[in-house]
């Protein structure tokens, strides 16, 4: 509900992240580090207190699924284990509203670093068609994940808490548009995706290990996730 104490932060950060995601990657600050078909992954080198927190921005586009189908599967706790191979445990600590949950997830340990967990609110929202951010898209959806505190989150000394800000922005285009008077089919669906993340790994973790992990894991994650949604929705009625 919009009366929750976190709501002003959720609303502000979600719209800021939308703007950040829609900024181009020109100007030389972003370094292309992976490219596979339509998927391009960029990073910026940034260290905070000797820790690698390299911001990442990935752009991709896929046919056959809508922005809503993409963001729903990214946000929903019910299918998290179907695509996210980096987590060992996941709990929804709180449902702030129908579109905002608080997740606690334990990530698989990456040797030689200590095991990490993430505690964050996750907000899903359709951007109003009147919002300029919608551009010439059929529709625009966003999920924003932001680290937060929660009284019910267990504190295990052996586990290091990461600090993350993640946004997942999807836009549906009817390309090619359906024939005059015809309903769209999945062949008319083109969805453009922008995934942004800044993750501070928390405690000690060698830069070489973190950079190796995210250079290997992120391209796999985005390809795997988008293919999973396209395959899962293929035989279903289109969910705009
Ligand atoms: C590699 C790095 C970027 C630092 C990293 C390290 C770890 C913790 C696991 C880990 C990996 C490598 C080294 C140490 N710990 C988690 C994540 C992470 C968490 C969440 C999301 S999400 O997009 O919100 C999808 C929901 O799960 C994406 C990425 C990233």
Image (spheres, helix red, strand yellow):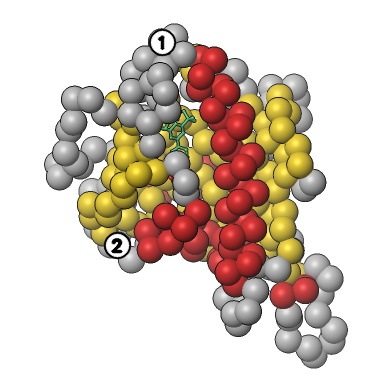
Q: Could you tell me residue 122's position as x and y percent?
A: 38, 50
Q: Could you tell me residue 147's position as x and y percent?
A: 34, 37
Q: Secondary structure at mark 2?
A: strand
Q: Quadrant of the C terminus?
A: bottom right
Residue 41 image-quadrant placement: top right
Residue most toward the bottom?
181
Residue most toward the top?
50
**Image position of 99 with respect to 145: above or below:** below
Quadrant for ligand 1 reads top left
Residues at badges 1 and 2 in contact (C-beta under 8 Å)? no
Identity of the residue drawn at 50% across and 54% down = 83
Q: Is residue 122 left or right of residue 84?
A: left
Q: Quadrant of the N terminus?
A: bottom left
How busy is the neighbourhood of tag 1: few (under 14 within 10 Å), some, or many (20 plus)? Answer: few
Q: Tell which circle, 1 or 2, labels the residue nearer the N-terminal end.
A: 1
The one nearer the camera, 19 or 114, is: 114
Q: Which residue is mark 1?
A: 49
Question: Can see residue 199?
Answer: yes
Identity of the residue drawn at 19% across and 25% down = 157
Q: Which residue is mark 2?
A: 97
Residue 227 image-quadrant placement: bottom right
């Amino acid at each position: 509900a919009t009366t929750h104490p976190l709501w002003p932060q959720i609303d502000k950060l979600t719209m800021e992240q939308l703007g950040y995601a829609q900024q181009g990657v020109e100007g030389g600050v972003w370094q292309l580090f992976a490219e596979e078909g339509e998927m391009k992954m960029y990073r910026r080198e940034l260290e905070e207190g000797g820790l690698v927190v390299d911001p990442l921005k990935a752009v991709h586009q896929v046919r056959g699924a809508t922005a809503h189908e993409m963001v729903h599967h990214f946000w929903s706790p019910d299918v998290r284990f179907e695509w996210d191979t980096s987590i060992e445990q996941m709990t929804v600590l709180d449902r702030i509203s129908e579109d905002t949950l608080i997740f606690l997830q334990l990530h698989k340990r990456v040797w030689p670093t200590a095991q990490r967990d993430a505690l964050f609110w996750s907000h899903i929202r359709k951007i109003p068609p009147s919002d300029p951010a919608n551009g010439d898209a059929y529709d625009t959806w966003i999920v924003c994940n932001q680290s937060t505190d929660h009284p019910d989150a267990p504190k295990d000394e052996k586990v290091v808490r990461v600090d993350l800000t993640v946004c997942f922005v999807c836009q549906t285009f009817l390309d090619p548009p359906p024939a005059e008077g015809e309903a769209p089919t999945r062949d008319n669906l083109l969805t453009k995706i922008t995934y942004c993340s800044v993750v501070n790994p928390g405690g000690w973790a060698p830069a070489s290990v973190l950079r190796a992990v995210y250079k290997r894991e992120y391209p796999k994650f985005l390809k795997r996730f988008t293919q999973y949604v396209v395959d899962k929705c293929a035989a279903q009625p289109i969910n705009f």
